[in-house]
Structures are given as C-alpha cells and as structure tokens.
Image (cartoon, rainbow, N blue to C red):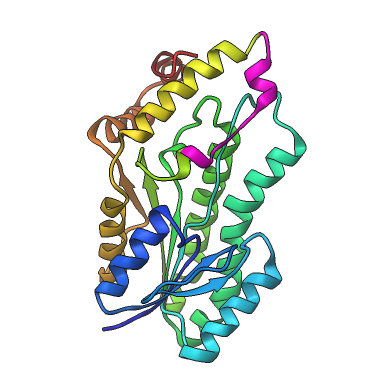
C-alpha cells in the first residue's frame, strides 16, 4: 500500500538515498531541505527543522495536499568535531539544535495528525555515536544519545495510538557528511589537544570515506517502513562496529573507554 512519507534532510546522503528508494517502491515522498530543491519524483519542501514554525508550515502543507502523513523519517543532521572543553556555546547550540531539537520539532508537529488517524510510523536517525561517546565528537554523540532517550520514551507514550517509533543507528558511511563536518579551529591549534585531535580526525575520515554506501541504509529504512512489527533499534554498520556495540554492553566502562582511546589514538 502506498504511503505518504516525510523525510527531513533529503537533499543528500541518507535522506536522498531513502527518498529515491521509497519513491521507486510506489510511495509518495516529501523531502525537506533548508535550500530550495527540485527533483522529478520527490516533492521538496523548504524547511528548517531548527525552527518550529517552519516545520509546522511544511507539515500543514503535506496534510492539505495528501490528508495524512503515514511515515516520518527524521534524518536532518550535522556534525562538529573537536574537544568538549574548547567547544563554543555557538557550536554546542548548533549541534544540539539541528540534531536533537530538529527531531523533536518534527515529531511534535506530526504527532497530532498521527494520533487523529490512529496510526503512523516514526523513524529517527541516531548513530553508533548515540550508543557510545566518541572522542572529539562528544556533542555529536550527546545529540544522538538524546535522540535515543527521546525516541525510547516516545515509543512507550504513543504505542497505544497505533504509532510505532524506531531508531536507526548507522556506523560509518560514505556520504557528504565527512566533507561538511565543522571542526573546531581552537582544538586544532591547541597545544594539548591539537595533535591528538588531528590524528583522531584522520582515522575518523578514513573510516567514513571507506564506509558503506548510503543505499545500504536506505534498504533498511524501506524494511522498517514495510515491517508489520518494527523493532525499536536497528544498528546498520559493518561487522567490526556491530561488535563494538556488543563490547560496549558487556565490558566494564573504564575498559571500553580504553578501547576507544586505543582505536582513535587519543
């Protein structure tokens, strides 16, 4: 059955790959971007997920045209690399406002319509960094940890309305995210953090540039959209990263931190 699907951050990366795949499967897909976009099969809306009024206007436009929203995929996000100590208020605000509050804004504006129709599916993009705190990506991890907690609580609250919530946890993927990451100049230039950060960043970028294709994640999203009983969490990563999630759950905390320090050469 064809569904009406809203995907935030659909102009590139995961969002675009998912949108293209879901359209090809016969769904009606609305994608959002902060800048105007055109696509032959994706209906693009100009939306800034950080602004509640912008989200409200976009959701209302879909409801006016389609009468419903069956699935929302909260994908819009960005990354800032650097030391937690040296992060500026502006950097922290940008990270949390886009990744976490953007997800919250979209869910809050869509949920009244899903409750009214007594059904819907919410798919929130977290990260392997939402399962473990990644060095020099601490506020990115914090934003994704927040999505994990928000989504788990939301799942408990809305299940009785026929609404399901799923969390997708990607590992390293080859997307434009790597090139668009904002890196703290203060950290790069710092006598204590600089060398360690540059070394760690080189490892991060190498892993991302050699990562999985976004179409792999798009296929998983399609599976969740079509599932009769979707799970709460879906890790999507290579074997090594899936093993790291397992290690995180079984190793003593200090041991796992040492594993992270060794891997990222911190």
Residue 144 seen anywhere in this rendered image of the structure:
yes
Does the stretch in magenta take in 264? no
**Residue at far right of view:** 89
Residue at 32% of width from left, 67% of height from top? 20
Q: Where is residue 81 in the image (x, y as percent from the top left)?
A: 57, 31
Residue 149 vertical placement versus 57 (above, below):
above
In the rendered image, residue 187 lying in the magenta stretch gets the answer yes
Residue interval drawn in magenta: 179-191
- The vertical placement of 87 against 33, above or below, is above
Please provide percent x and percent y for residue 223: 25, 63
> Front-most of 166 and 81?
81
Viewer-side residue, 170 vs 116: 170
Q: Quadrant of the N terminus?
A: bottom left
**Which residue sits at x=34%, y=80%?**
3
> How many numbered circles are shown?
0
Q: Is residue 215 above or below residue 52?
A: above
Expressed as whole percent of the image width and height from the top left, the position of residue 24 reads: 26, 73
In the rendered image, is residue 167 in sight?
A: no
Q: Position of residue 59 (x, y in %)?
A: 57, 78
Which residue does the image show at 35% across and 41% down from the upper left?
174
Asked which quadrant contains residue 88, the reply is: top right
In the displayed structure image, the side of residue 24 where residue 148 appears, left or right: right
Residue nearer the viewer, 85 or 154:
85
Furthest toward the top, the residue is 191
From the viewer's side, name the closer residue of 50 and 178. Answer: 178
């Amino acid at each position: 059955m064809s569904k009406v699907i809203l995907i935030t951050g659909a102009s590139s990366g995961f969002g675009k790959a998912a949108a293209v795949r879901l359209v090809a499967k016969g769904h009606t897909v609305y994608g959002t971007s902060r800048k105007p976009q055109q696509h032959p099969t994706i209906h693009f809306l100009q939306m800034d997920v950080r602004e509640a009024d912008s989200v409200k206007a976009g959701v209302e436009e879909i409801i006016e045209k389609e009468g419903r929203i069956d699935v929302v995929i909260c994908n819009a996000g960005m990354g800032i690399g650097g030391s937690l100590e040296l992060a500026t208020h502006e950097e922290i605000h940008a990270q949390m406002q886009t990744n976490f509050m953007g997800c919250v804004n979209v869910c809050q504006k869509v949920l009244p319509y899903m409750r009214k129709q007594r059904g819907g599916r919410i798919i929130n993009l977290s990260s392997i960094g939402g399962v473990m705190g990644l060095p020099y990506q601490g506020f990115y991890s914090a934003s994704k940890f927040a999505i994990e907690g928000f989504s788990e609580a939301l799942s408990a609250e809305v299940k009785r309305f026929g609404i399901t919530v799923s969390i997708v946890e990607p590992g390293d993927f080859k997307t434009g995210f790597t090139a668009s990451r904002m890196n703290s100049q203060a950290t790069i230039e710092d006598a204590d953090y600089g060398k360690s950060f540059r070394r760690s960043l080189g490892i991060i970028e190498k892993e991302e540039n050699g990562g999985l294709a976004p179409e792999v994640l798009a296929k998983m999203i399609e599976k969740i959209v079509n599932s009769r009983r979707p799970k709460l969490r879906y890790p999507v990563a290579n074997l090594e990263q899936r093993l790291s999630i397992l290690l995180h759950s079984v190793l003593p905390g200090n041991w796992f931190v040492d594993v992270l320090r060794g891997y990222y050469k911190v």
